[in-house]
């Protein structure tokens, strides 16, 4: 039995899915619950599941991706995937195929030596396997293709695909994209077995008492043929399947997929795909929560981004938006008040710089005349790669602090560079690059001129080695090292030598981490980091201040 859940609020769909799974926990262990989510959403779904009010246990429900489900079920019956070829091995195989088939390849033989070309070929082969397109299918497509250039390209891909499959067989290797195909074959085989299932297939008999919830798909893409084959196999074996899609409506036919907002086009396409290929017995709409001003503004921009936001459009859209369950149960119609009239505004600018300058001016006006605080204001950008640099420059010109919510690499912070350089000193035997990188992080207390003099002395006498750096024979004025520089060297590097000895003696990784943390605090780096953060905050450089704080 397949139940299709659809709605316009993704969070509401996921929350309903989680609530159903939590309610299903009362049937454990007689009936199990499995949630299938995209690989990148597995951790987030587990976190939300554990944050439910009843505090369910993850031991009573499985949160898996399709690939992890394949590993789980294939492993249960002793049909683990063979050794799979990794990215490097795949690149080697493809490169060899391109060279061996140069005479047959009419187009790709000329591109085999281009940087990155093998990676693109591997990506295309992965798409072929996910969508169950084999070499024979490509040959048939090439025969019916009217475009000569495209026909040559498809023929070349057919040759490469066939040779790649043969190479995997010769080396007794598997492709990771075949895991889902093998799972669908396993499910079909289980369906053909007579009851009761013999060993080892009876190890999967729990599937018949298991309910599946499939969430997170149908938002940006449809299910692949491999995934659809698995869902169809589970439908014939499992107790029930619940699938969520983000869609504003369920299309009645293929032409109806295009009817509605483009924002929910993937969801409508997925819903039609499921209805056409599976026996969907129930369809249930998950109504959104009570609409607030932000949701209404988002719906306006999604549905009418290409039209003027006139009062008639706002009122007509507001009247047609779905309400919460409680509001929908009220039979008496009521007119929705237009709350967007005073603050939803569309402003047209001639270029991006003028747009950001107008935003900066509006922020200054709100702060100075309407008692806003900077932290009350949020800016959403469409192209972070180009807009962030403009924001920094123009906001600095207007004297506005700005915090960019973006991924930041901690490796470039002074503290992380110091820690990495410290470990590199041990790994490289006190090489020049590691030692000088450590000293020039700005955290060791030493003037840059003195560090330059130490470097010149060490280079002149080839002292960048652990057995020479602290050799007293080189600590003379005749060899260019004054007592003051020798004292400074000991202050800077003797603590490094001592902590590296302690780290070598420590066995467990946790013990090494504790030693390193204690050493950083002993050297006063926590206070130095705090002082540098304060200076960055005072200068208005909030972005680097936050990054440095995160590194500590």
Image (spheres, rainbow, N blue to C red):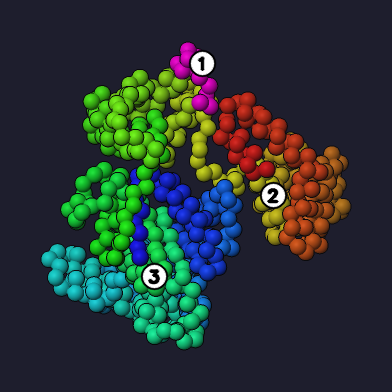
Is 108 left or right of 518, judged from the image as shown?
left
Q: Is residue 20 above or below residue 72?
A: above
- The answer, for residue 213, to whether it is visible in the render is yes
Near-viewer residue (103 or 283):
283
Disc 3 element:
helix
Q: Which residue is mark 2?
A: 419
Q: Residues within 10 Å of mark 1 (few under 14, many from 20)?
A: few
Rendered location of residue 482, percent (x, y)? 84, 41
Q: Does residue 276 belong to the magenta stretch? A: no
At 64% from the left and 44% from the top, the residue drawn is 551
Rendered location of residue 269, percent (x, y)? 27, 55
Closer to the eye: label 2 or 1: 1
Q: Which residue is mark 3?
A: 234
- Residues shaded magenta: 365-376
Residue 499 is labelled as none
Q: Mark 3 or mark 1: which comes first in sequence?
A: 3
Q: Contact (CB < 8 A) between labels 2 and 1?
A: no
Rendered location of residue 377, percent (x, y)? 48, 26
On-image quarter of the C terminus: top right
Q: Is residue 145 above or below residue 135?
A: above
Q: CA distance from mark 2 to mark 3?
A: 51 Å
């Amino acid at each position: 039995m397949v139940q299709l859940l659809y709605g316009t609020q993704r969070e509401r769909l996921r929350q309903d899915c989680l609530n159903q799974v939590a309610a299903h926990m009362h049937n454990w262990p007689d009936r199990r619950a499995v949630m299938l989510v995209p690989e990148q959403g597995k951790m987030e779904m587990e976190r939300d599941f554990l944050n439910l009010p009843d505090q369910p246990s993850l031991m009573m429900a499985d949160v898996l991706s399709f690939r992890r489900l394949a590993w789980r079920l294939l492993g249960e019956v002793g049909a683990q995937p063979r050794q799979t070829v990794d990215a490097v091995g795949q690149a080697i195989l493809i490169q060899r195929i391109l060279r061996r088939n140069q005479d047959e390849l009419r187009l790709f033989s000329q591109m085999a030596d281009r940087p990155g070309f093998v990676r693109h070929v591997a990506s295309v082969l992965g798409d072929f396997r996910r969508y169950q397109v084999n070499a024979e299918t490509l040959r048939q497509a090439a025969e019916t293709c009217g475009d000569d250039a495209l026909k040559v390209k498809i023929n070349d891909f057919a040759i490469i695909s066939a040779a790649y499959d043969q190479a995997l067989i010769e080396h007794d290797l598997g492709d990771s994209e075949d895991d889902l195909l093998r799972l669908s074959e396993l499910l079909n085989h289980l369906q053909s077995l007579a009851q009761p299932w013999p060993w080892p297939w009876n190890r999967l008999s729990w599937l018949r008492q298991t309910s599946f919830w499939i969430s997170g798909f149908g938002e940006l893409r449809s299910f692949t043929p491999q995934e659809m084959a698995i869902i169809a196999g589970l439908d014939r074996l499992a107790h029930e399947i619940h699938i969520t899609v983000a869609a504003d409506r369920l299309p009645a036919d293929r032409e109806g997929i295009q009817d509605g907002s483009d924002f929910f086009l993937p969801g409508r396409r997925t819903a039609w795909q499921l209805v056409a290929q599976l026996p969907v017995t129930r369809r249930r709409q998950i109504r959104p929560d009570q609409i607030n001003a932000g949701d209404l503004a988002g719906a306006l921009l999604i549905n009418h981004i290409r039209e003027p936001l006139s009062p008639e459009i706002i009122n007509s859209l507001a009247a047609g938006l779905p309400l919460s369950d409680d509001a929908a149960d009220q039979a008496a119609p009521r007119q929705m008040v237009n709350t967007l009239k005073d603050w939803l505004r569309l402003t047209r600018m001639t270029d991006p710089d003028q747009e950001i300058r107008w935003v900066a001016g509006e922020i200054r006006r709100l702060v100075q005349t309407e008692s806003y605080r900077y932290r009350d204001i949020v800016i959403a950008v469409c192209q972070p790669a180009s807009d962030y640099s403009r924001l920094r420059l123009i906001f600095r010109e207007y004297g506005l602090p700005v915090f960019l919510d973006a991924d930041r690499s901690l490796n470039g912070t002074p503290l992380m560079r110091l820690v990495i350089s410290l470990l590199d000193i041990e790994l490289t035997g006190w090489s020049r690059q590691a030692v000088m990188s450590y000293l020039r992080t700005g955290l060791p207390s030493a003037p840059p001129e003195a560090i330059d003099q130490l470097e010149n002395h060490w280079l002149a006498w080839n002292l960048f080695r652990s057995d020479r750096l602290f050799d007293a024979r080189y600590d003379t004025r005749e060899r260019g090292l004054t007592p003051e520089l020798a004292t400074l060297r000991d202050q800077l590097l003797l603590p490094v030598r001592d902590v590296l000895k302690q780290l070598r003696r420590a066995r467990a990784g946790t013990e090494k981490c504790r030693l390193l943390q204690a050493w950083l605090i002993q050297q006063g780096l926590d206070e130095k980091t705090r002082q540098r953060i304060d200076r960055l905050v005072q200068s208005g450089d909030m972005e680097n201040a936050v990054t440095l704080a995160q590194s500590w």
